[in-house]
């Protein structure tokens, strides 16, 4: 590199001052923060690797009061949070779910939650029950609940391994019903599953019945792309646009 290039790179800005982050419009600040804070894995759960994936990002909350305020809005609105933990290390009866560990003002800005069904299908984990400890009533911006089904034990291949054909179906249906009741502004439930799960099987049929009974919209995730109709695809595009717009929040300055 030439001496001229080195000299030009080291020169200060024309006014002799660094550019101030808060001189940018809120939309640009939120966009920059999303690059810094949003992980490739958009679903967050209790996991032993969280400290490696999130600690450096969450340290940005400590820059200043205003910076932290805007940063946590972007971080918690930019990810989907799993309601009940699925990692084996955190399935003990004394382990509280992630939502229960967070303060209410973080739950206030979340826009998407996930209910993952399948782990512990023969003996559901003890922390998997709905109560006020989860703080679901604080999730005043969550309009989309994602339900991902890993297995359907009502399938004949599970015969001989399950307690009975309907045990996990009934458990899952009750869990979904209770979660929907606690979320104050929920309007859409998005379903997805692994390839082995039959859309017309007993478990999916029960979950769809509960969703219709609660008068929530039904959408389909990208793993299976069950929604083949044009109307389903348009609905998915609408929901995605709605979630993206929710990440840029009209924030009031922190005094």
Image: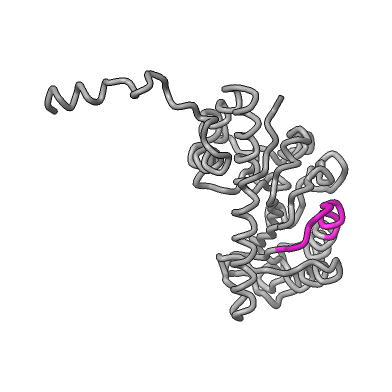
- Residue sitting at 81 percent across and 55 percent down? 185
Asked if residue 74 shows in the view, the reply is yes
Query: Left or right: 253 with respect to 181?
Result: left
**Residue 187 highlighted magenta (yes or no):** yes
Q: Nearer the viewer, residue 26 or 219?
A: 26
Q: Looking at this rendering, what residue extends furthest in the left direction?
A: 2
- Residue sitting at 26 percent across and 21 percent down? 10
Figure quadrant of the N terminus: top left
Question: Vertical placement of 254 versus 213: above or below?
Answer: above
- Residue sitting at 73 percent across and 34 percent down? 102
Query: Left or right: 17 with respect to 131?
Result: left
Asked if residue 88 shows in the view, the reply is no
Looking at the picture, the colour scheme in use is one colour
**Residue 28 highlighted magenta (yes or no):** no
Residue 98: which quarter of the image? top right
Extent of the magenta region:
177-189
Figure quadrant of the C terminus: top right
Q: Nearer the viewer, residue 117 or 62?
A: 62
Question: Vertical placement of 104 versus 19: above or below?
Answer: below
- Residue sitting at 68 percent across and 31 percent down? 253
Q: Position of residue 179 (x, y in %)?
A: 82, 54
Q: Nearer the viewer, residue 166 or 43?
A: 43
Q: Position of residue 203 (x, y in %)?
A: 75, 69
């Amino acid at each position: 590199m030439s001496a001229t290039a080195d000299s030009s790179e080291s020169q200060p800005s024309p006014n002799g001052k660094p550019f101030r982050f808060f001189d940018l419009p809120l939309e640009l600040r939120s966009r920059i923060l999303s690059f810094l804070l949003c992980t490739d894995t958009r679903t967050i759960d209790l996991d032993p690797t969280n400290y490696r994936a999130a600690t450096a990002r969450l340290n940005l909350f400590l820059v200043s009061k205003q910076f932290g305020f805007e940063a946590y809005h972007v971080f918690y609105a930019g990810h989907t949070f799993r309601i009940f933990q699925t990692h084996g290390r955190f399935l003990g009866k004394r382990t509280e779910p992630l939502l229960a560990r967070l303060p209410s003002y973080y739950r206030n800005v979340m826009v998407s939650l996930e209910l993952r069904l399948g782990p512990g299908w023969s003996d559901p984990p003890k922390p998997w029950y709905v109560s006020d400890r989860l703080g679901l009533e604080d999730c005043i911006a969550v309009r989309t609940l994602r339900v991902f089904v890993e297995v359907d034990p009502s399938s004949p291949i599970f015969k001989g391994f399950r307690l009975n054909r309907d045990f996990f179906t009934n458990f899952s249906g009750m869990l979904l019903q209770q979660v929907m009741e606690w979320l104050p502004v929920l309007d859409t439930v998005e379903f997805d599953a692994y390839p082995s799960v039959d859309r017309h099987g007993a478990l999916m049929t029960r979950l769809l019945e509960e969703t219709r009974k609660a008068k929530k919209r039904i959408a389909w995730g990208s793993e299976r792309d069950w929604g083949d109709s044009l109307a389903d695809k348009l609905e998915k595009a609408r929901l995605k646009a709605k979630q993206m717009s929710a990440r840029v929040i009209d924030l009031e300055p922190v005094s």
